[in-house]
Image (spheres, grey):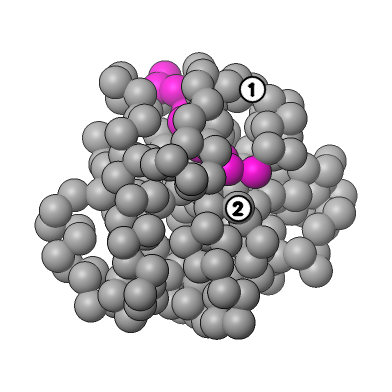
Amino acid sequence: MALRASDGRAPDRQASGVRLATAPDRAALSVMFARAFADEPALCWVFPNPGGRERRLRRLFAVLFDSDAGGVRLTMPDSAAATLWRPPGHADTTLAEMLRYAPQMLAAFGGAIGRGLALSKAIDAHFPPQPFWYLHLAGCDPAQQGRGLGRAVVQAGIDRMGGSGLPFYLETATERNIGFYQSLGFRVTSEWRVGRDGPVFWSMLNG
C-alpha cells in the first residue's frame, strides 16, 4: 500500500535534522500517519466508517513501519513528518510478507480486509517495469503543517538515494498532492482506478 499526505510548503529554519527512523519511533509515527491519512480518499474507501478509522489506521501503519524495515525510513526528530521508502526490487507485497504479517493485517482491517487486499493488488499492478526507489508512505501531522516538514523529509530521501541513478516512484489518491510532487521533480505517468467504484490514483515518476 502506498499513499500520500504531505505538507508542500517551503521548509522553515526548523525543518531540518531529518534522521533514520528506528524501532523506538514506531508508536509515535503510527499515530502521526493515522492523523495525516484520516481523510485520505483511498483509506476512506477502505474504512468508510469514520468512527473507528483512526484506531485501525494506527494498527495498519505500525505494520507498514515494520514491513519497511529493509528500506529507508526517515523522520523528523519530533515525529511530525516521515517517509518510508522501499528499495529497488522490493516494492511489491510478496506472499511471504502477507503471511508474516497476516494476523496484524487482519486485526487492522477487520471486515475491510477485502477492500484492503483489492487496494494492495491494484497498487502492485501499476508499478513501473524498470527498477526504482518506491516512496511507500509520506506523511505530515496536520497540526504541524505549514512548516515545510513534508517537503523536507521527502527531499531528504531523494537526496539520500539520488546517487543510485535509479528513478523514484509513487502513487497518490489525493489530487491536490500532484502539484507538490511535480515541484519535487515527479511527473504523472498514468491515472487509474481501483475496481469499478474505488479511488482514483495518479502514478508519478521522478527520473
Residue 84, how many percent across, how many down? Answer: 47, 52
**Residue 112 covered by magenta stretch:** no
**Residue 172 covered by magenta stretch:** yes
The residue that appears at 68% across and 32% down in the rendered structure is 178
Q: Is residue 168 above or below residue 77?
A: above
Q: Circle 2: is it few (<14), some (14-19), or many (20+) Cα within 10 Å?
A: many
Q: Circle 1: is it few (<14), some (14-19), or many (20+) Cα within 10 Å?
A: some
The residue that appears at 23% across and 69% down in the rendered structure is 101
**Span highlighted in magenta in the image:** 165-174
Residue 130, how many percent across, how many down? Answer: 30, 19
Return the residue nearer the eye: 41 or 157.
41
The secondary element bearing badge 1 is classed as loop
Give, as a three-letter code, the residue at label 1. Answer: Gly
The residue identified by callout 1 is 185
Give, as a three-letter code, the residue at label 2. Answer: Pro
Quick check: 185 left or right of 65?
right
The answer to which image quadrant residue 88 occupies is top left
Q: Is residue 155 visible?
A: yes
Return the residue nearer the eye: 81 or 179.
179
Residue 53, how many percent across, how many down? Answer: 55, 75
The residue that appears at 20% across and 58% down in the rendered structure is 97
The residue that appears at 54% across and 38% down in the rendered structure is 200
The residue identified by callout 2 is 41
